[in-house]
């Protein structure tokens, strides 16, 4: 697989406060500070106008080879560089996350340790952050063993036990012992950098391995599922519980397209998919944190929910362009903000209800849903029922048209259906009757309006003849049985119309920006699920195995795959895609009993 700097062969380190992307040679190419949605101090991924800046790397003199791996069951990334003279170094990167004083410690910090592995390697440390979205080099000051970078939004301190001139002035030096650089807030370390790095590393490894230990993973494809689950967890912002769609902005969906969007925000739909996937693995704490985020949003809302919010509850995410960043491979524009906040996407109410449903049934939870929580959740159900047959932009966020989208209507049915189940579970007979009757009314209307009269398959909108990949979810949502002839016909029609080779498109009709050029990875995973559901499990397994080969060398996925080249495109790492991987693996895997 191509590992030039201009691709998505990137690793992720993070801790719920920050997330950094690191390329195959150990260069930090993306990291927003002080949080996921902040100004990217490291932004070389998006080609700053000021060249050869916006990164932190370790240059090994005479480098001839490199390799990279994660420490098992952690987001601790290890990069090895080898030189022509036989010397070698190891770069170990992580963001501290562990239990401390009865809570999770997750500072705005990335720790880098560099070790000589063989010989006496000669290295150069190049720490070159930018500020103002790539606009300028920040002012800096220094002390006896640290540098301070005065970024627009925060002061970044780099504390090191390497001789300071080597870091400050980028002087090449012989690495004859381990050294560490602690990037973090403008606070004095209470320990020597190497001691701090060592203790934080051990605690972080212990935290993640314990977290992984309690996952209920499938018997097959364990490594892929574990890596996906860890990465999903890294995309949840600890401060509020928000879950971002990806850590990046403006990685194009295809070469030289204008489909460059900022995904560093919380889409209620995407986040609900993440919550449900992690719930299936037994990682329910993410659900509890996310529902607190939703509760805070709802408390400040006027009865209607937008499809996307900022991670600090911002309701408005006005788009603008970062003019000092030329874009991924120079393919701009680079956008800050996302105007999807202006849209009406009516499936969000069902997404909220589905994300919360397990809260009422899972007896492992310390705080479970009660009648008061149900009453609050009913507000989402009321909106879903009121809007189910009204036009919206749909889950694909069309900017130039609106329809009564089938998926939005089915999610309204799901909201009513789950509220009926919850009411029955809580012994609220009157409310159960109300919600069950509403679910029946919505379902009957969908079946009357959203089935093709000649071909017998579902269509993307009331009265339409088009297909879109979200129809593959109707059986998983419980709207129809997998064996229902209408669903089987839908899966088969989508396979004929939306599939190109091993990949599935969201839709193929031109939208506001022309015809889509790349496949949408989660849609291909939905297709795998649907194939298995209708009995074509061998075909589904074979396709799933081929999809796993599209992951980058560290097991991660972006949003899109180019069907001709197999290359990854779109924002990274994409939570949607990783959710699809987990759900498909859960469905297809053999039972544990059959492999033990």
Image (tube, helix red, strand yellow):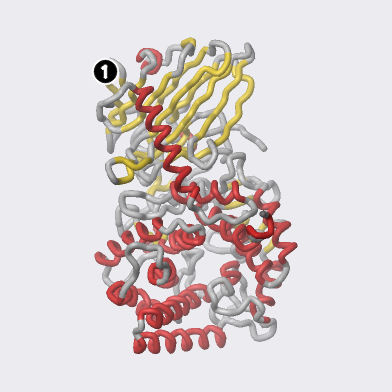
Residue sitting at x 34%, y 34% = 131
Above or below 448: residue 418? above
Residue sitting at x 44%, y 72% = 392
Residue 502: percent from left, percent from top: 70, 56
Which quadrant would the C terminus be assigned to in this image? bottom right
The picture quadrant where one finds residue 203 is top left
Above or below 510: residue 168? above
Residue 585: percent from left, percent from top: 61, 57
Q: Nearer the viewer, residue 349 or 594?
A: 594
Q: Nearer the viewer, residue 334 or 526?
A: 526
Q: Is residue 50 visible?
A: no
Q: Which residue is mark 1?
A: 143
Residue 220: percent from left, percent from top: 64, 53
Residue sitting at x 35%, y 35% = 109
Residue sitting at x 65%, y 50% = 548
Which quadrant would the N terminus be assigned to in this image? top right
Residue 592: percent from left, percent from top: 63, 58
């Amino acid at each position: 697989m191509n590992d030039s700097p201009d691709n998505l062969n990137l690793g992720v380190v993070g801790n719920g406060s920050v997330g950094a992307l690191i390329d195959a040679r150990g260069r930090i190419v993306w990291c927003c500070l002080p949080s996921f949605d902040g100004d990217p101090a490291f932004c070389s991924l998006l080609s700053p106008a000021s060249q050869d800046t916006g990164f932190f790397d370790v240059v090994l003199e005479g480098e001839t080879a490199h390799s990279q791996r994660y420490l098992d069951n952690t987001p601790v990334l290890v990069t090895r560089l080898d030189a022509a003279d036989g010397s070698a170094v190891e770069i170990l990167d992580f963001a501290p996350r562990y239990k401390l004083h009865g809570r999770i410690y997750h500072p705005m910090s990335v720790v880098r340790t560099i070790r000589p592995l063989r010989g006496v390697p000669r290295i150069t440390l190049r720490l070159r952050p930018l500020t103002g979205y790539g606009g300028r080099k920040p002012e800096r000051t220094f002390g006896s063993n640290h540098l301070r970078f005065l970024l627009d939004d925060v002061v970044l301190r780099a504390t090191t036990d390497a001789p300071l001139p080597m870091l400050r002035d980028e002087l090449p030096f012989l690495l004859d012992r381990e050294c560490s650089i602690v990037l973090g807030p403008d606070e004095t370390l209470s320990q020597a950098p190497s001691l701090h790095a060592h203790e934080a590393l051990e605690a972080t490894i212990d935290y993640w391995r314990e977290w992984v230990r309690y996952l209920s993973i499938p018997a097959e494809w364990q490594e892929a599922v574990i890596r996906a689950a860890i990465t999903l967890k890294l995309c949840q912002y600890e401060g509020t519980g928000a879950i971002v769609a990806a850590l990046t902005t403006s990685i194009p969906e295809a070469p030289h397209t204008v489909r460059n969007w900022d995904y560093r925000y919380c889409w209620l739909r995407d986040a609900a998919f993440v919550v449900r996937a992690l719930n299936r693995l037994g990682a329910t704490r993410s659900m509890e944190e996310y529902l607190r985020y939703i509760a805070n949003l709802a408390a400040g809302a006027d009865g209607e929910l937008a499809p996307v919010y900022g991670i600090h509850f911002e309701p408005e995410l006005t788009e603008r362009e970062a003019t000092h960043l030329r874009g991924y491979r120079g393919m701009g524009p680079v956008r800050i903000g996302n105007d999807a906040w202006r849209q009406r996407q009516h499936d969000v109410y069902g997404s909220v209800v589905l994300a919360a449903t397990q809260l009422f049934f899972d007896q492992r939870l310390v705080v479970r849903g009660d009648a008061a929580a149900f009453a609050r959740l009913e507000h989402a159900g009321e909106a879903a029922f009121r809007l189910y047959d009204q036009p919206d932009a749909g889950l694909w966020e069309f900017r130039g048209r609106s329809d009564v989208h089938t998926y939005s209507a089915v999610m309204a049915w799901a909201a009513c259906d789950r509220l009926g189940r919850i009411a029955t579970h809580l012994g609220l007979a009157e409310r159960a009757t109300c919600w069950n009757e509403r679910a029946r009314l919505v379902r009957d209307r969908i079946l009357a309006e959203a089935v093709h009269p000649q071909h017998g398959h579902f269509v993307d909108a009331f009265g339409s003849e088009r297909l879109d990949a979200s129809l593959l979810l109707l059986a998983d949502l419980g709207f129809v049985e997998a064996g229902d002839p209408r669903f089987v016909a839908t899966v088969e029609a989508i396979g004929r119309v939306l599939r190109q080779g091993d990949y599935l498109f969201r839709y193929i009709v031109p939208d506001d920006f022309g015809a889509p050029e790349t496949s949408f990875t989660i849609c291909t995973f939905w297709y795998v699920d649907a194939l298995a559901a209708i009995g074509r499990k061998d075909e589904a397994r074979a396709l799933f195995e081929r999809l796993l080969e599209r992951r980058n060398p560290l097991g991660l996925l972006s949003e899109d795959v180019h069907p001709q080249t197999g290359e990854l495109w779109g924002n990274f790492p994409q939570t949607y895609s990783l959710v699809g991987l987990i759900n498909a693996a859960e469905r297809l895997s053999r039972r544990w009993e059959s492999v033990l």
